[in-house]
Image (spheres, rainbow, N blue to C red):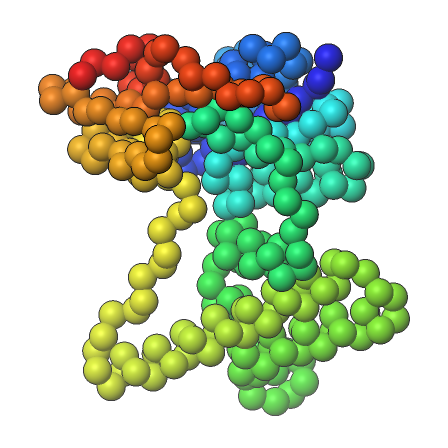
Amino acid sequence: MIKAYVAGPMRGYDQFNFPAFDHCAAVLRAWEWEVRSPAEHDREGGFDEKQNSLDGFDLTAAMRWDLEAVLWADVVVLLPGWEDSSGAAIALTVANATGKRVMTFDPWEEEVEDLEPESPLAEADRLVSGARQADYGHPIEDFTRTGRMWGAILGVGDIDPAHVGLCMAAVKISREVNRPKRDNLVDLAGYAKTVHLVRERQRWTTTSMRTGSPPPSRPAPRASSSAGGWWSPSGCSPTAPPTCRGPTRQACQHGSCGACCTRRYARSPGTTRTPKARWWSVSGSPTCPG
C-alpha cells in the first residue's frame, strides 16, 4: 500500500483550505492509498477550521507532526497553490532531501502526476515571489534596513539596497567557487531577481514623485480559495461561475445559490480515465443543482 502525505496552502484560505485537503485524501483513499493529512490531524486535536482563527493553535507541535508524516510517507502529494505555502515548501525540501516521490494533485480531474524537477532558476523564482517575500517583505525594505546597518558598521553612508543584493550575490559566487552546490545557484538566481525588484521599485518611486502615479499592483496568486474553501483555476465563487474549456469539462450555475459545478473525472495513476456520472460543486453538493 502506498503511503501518502498531503501538503498544501492553509493560511489565507477560507476554512484554512481544509475542504481541499479532504477532497484529495478521499480520492487517494479510493485508490487504496494510506493517507496522512494535516487537516485531519488538526481536527482530531480539536482545531475548528470554520472559526478561521489560529488562536490557541500550537504551530510547533503541528510542524513536528508534519515533518514526521513526510518522513513516514512514500509520496508527498502537493495541492494547488503549494508554491506560495511556506509549510509546503518545507515538506518539499524534506521530501527531496530524503528521496521521496513528489506528486501534484489536480482537483478537477482527480489525478496526480509527478512534479517536474525544478531548475535553480524556477526554484529561485518560486521562493522569491512566494514564501520568502511573505516572510521578509519586499526586497527593497529588507535590503534598505541591511544597507543602513552595513553603512553604520563600515562608517559610511547607507548602502544602496540594490548594491546589498549584488554583494549577497557575490557571497554566493564565492561559496560556489569554494564548494559547488545547488543551493548556491538557487540563492544566486534569487538575489539577481531581488536586485531586479529593487531597481523596479526605485524606478517607480522616481516616476511617482514626478507624476503621482500609484504603485504597480501585485500579481494575483497562482491559486485562489473559492466558496467553501475549494480551489478553482478560474477563481470560482458564488458570483463568478467557472469557465471550463475542453471536451472533458462542463459547468453550470444555479440561479438561486450560485453554486459552481464541474463534472468530475477520476483516474488512478497508470489507468484509463473514467467519467463519473455525478457532479461536484464548491458548495459540497454531490449533484448539480442546475
Label tally:
0
Q: Position of residue 235 (x, y in %)?
A: 31, 38
The answer to whether one can see residue 160 in this image is yes
- Whether residue 258 sits left or right of residue 261 in the image: it is left
Could you say where residue 226 lies in the image, as x and y percent from the top left? 32, 32
Residue closest to the far left: 256
Reply above or below: 153 against 214. Answer: below
Q: Residue at x 40, y 48 (%)?
A: 221
Residue 176: x and y, percent?
A: 81, 69
Residue positioned most to the bottom: 156
Residue at image coords 18%, 33%? 239
- The residue shown at (60%, 33%) is 113
Camera-side residue: 231 or 31?
31
Q: Quadrant of residue 34?
A: top right
Instruction: Quadrant for the C terminus, please.
Output: top left
Location of residue 155 with respect to 66 vertically, above or below: below
* Relative image position of residue 222 (x, y in whole percent): 43, 46
Q: Quadrant of the N terminus?
A: top right
> Relative to 205, is 131 above or below?
above
Name the residue rendered at 57%, 43% in the picture.
86
